[in-house]
Amino acid sequence: MKKVTILDVQAMKDRGEKITMLTAYDYAFGKIVDACGVDIILVGDSVGTVVQGVANTLPVTMEEMIYHTRMVARGRARALLVFDMPFMSYQESVEQARRNAGRAIKESGAEAVKLEGGENVAEAIAAIVNMDVPVMAHIGLTPQSVHRMGGFKVQGREAKQRKKLLADAKAVEDAGAFAVVLECVPAELAAEITRRLKIPTIGIGSGIRCDGQVLVIHDLLGLYTDRKISFVKQYVNLNQAIVKAVVTYLDEVRRGAFPGKEHTFFMKPKKRTKK
């Protein structure tokens, strides 16, 4: 089983092969998606919404991200593991960004970090890359900027936004990012950015012409039901399956049908003694 590195990710773009990325937040899901052959596992700060149940990603801390990434790292053998830098772990200063990126790699088992932003974080990206820590960038809809953007909205439909996103894409590439996530960018603009950049683009809600795609695993599996997201494809509804299983368990316990003999331990029969 060949380990995926940032060099392999670049080679996939160069060969025109699609790159696959999924999120994971614990050992079990990390092991499952890795065994399936996913190229990149992102331990996203989306853990805040889909695991912790908060309204957005802003409350997530470095300690929480390190904790979840450690669990995923234990189950991952092949995929490139990326640590999502949470809000206020890199925005204060370049020194803060370098220190926390170093912590992420040293303490979590990740092999790269992800930062949200374009031109505004280019200096931080360059500083982290100069520490020999690979950086994945993230532009377009950046969830940590939800209040500035007025909600979770498509970015790049207007001429001014388009110009800014093109500049952001160039800035993160020039800063040394090995890839860039394009979130909720119009398909035509995402395709243009993908053509212009030498580094891979990973789309989410940005059309098929990106170099790869990413989804939140809880969305893919139908486990997150708080909000319907139009650009997500639900491949199975595990929420319904889990509800059915739990309701059946409750019924069997209440009826005395569980546990059965096959789920029960008994004393060993006493040996007969000769008289």
Image: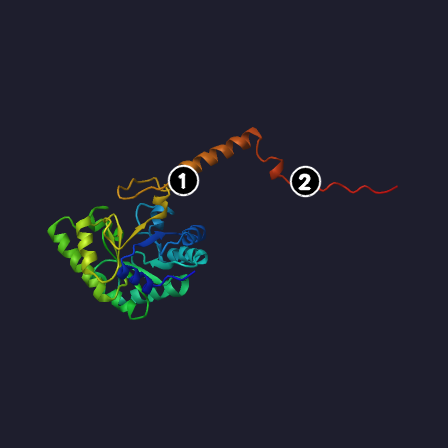
Residue pictured at 45% horizontal, 34% vertical: 244
From the top left corner, tell me how far across and down residue 43 is, in percent: 36, 55
Q: Which residue is mark 2?
A: 266
Which of 244 and 122 lies nearest the eye of the viewer?
244
Can residue 33 be seen at all in this image of the molecule? yes
**Mark 2 crowdedness (10 Å alpha carbons): few <14, some 14-19, many ≥20:** few
From the top left corner, tell me how far across and down residue 253 is, in percent: 55, 33
Three-letter code, disc 2: Phe
Tell me, for residue 238, which label it has, or none: 1
Residue pictured at 11% horizontal, 51% vertical: 159
Q: Does residue 82 appear to the left or right of 183 in the view shown?
A: right
Where on the picture, by quarter, is residue 165? bottom left
Q: CA distance from mark 2 to mark 1?
A: 35 Å
Quadrant location, the C terminus = top right
**Mark 1 crowdedness (10 Å alpha carbons): few <14, some 14-19, many ≥20:** some
Tell me, for residue 6, which label it has, or none: none
Which of 191 and 139 lies nearest the eye of the viewer?
191
Q: Are marks 2 and 1 in contact (CB under 8 Å)?
A: no
Where on the picture, by quarter, is residue 236? top left
From the top left corner, tell me how far across and down residue 152 is, in percent: 24, 46
Q: Is residue 167 above or below residue 28?
A: below
Can residue 89 be seen at all in this image of the molecule? no
Which of 136 and 122 lies nearest the eye of the viewer?
136
Q: How is the image coloured?
A: rainbow
Which of 269 and 47 lies nearest the eye of the viewer?
269
From the top left corner, tell me how far across and down residue 169 is, in percent: 20, 59
Nearest to N terminus: mark 2 or mark 1:
1
Going by the picture, which residue comes out furthest to the front? 15
Residue pictured at 47% horizontal, 33% vertical: 247
Residue pictured at 19% horizontal, 53% vertical: 191
Judging from the image, what secondary structure is the residue with disc 2 in? Answer: loop
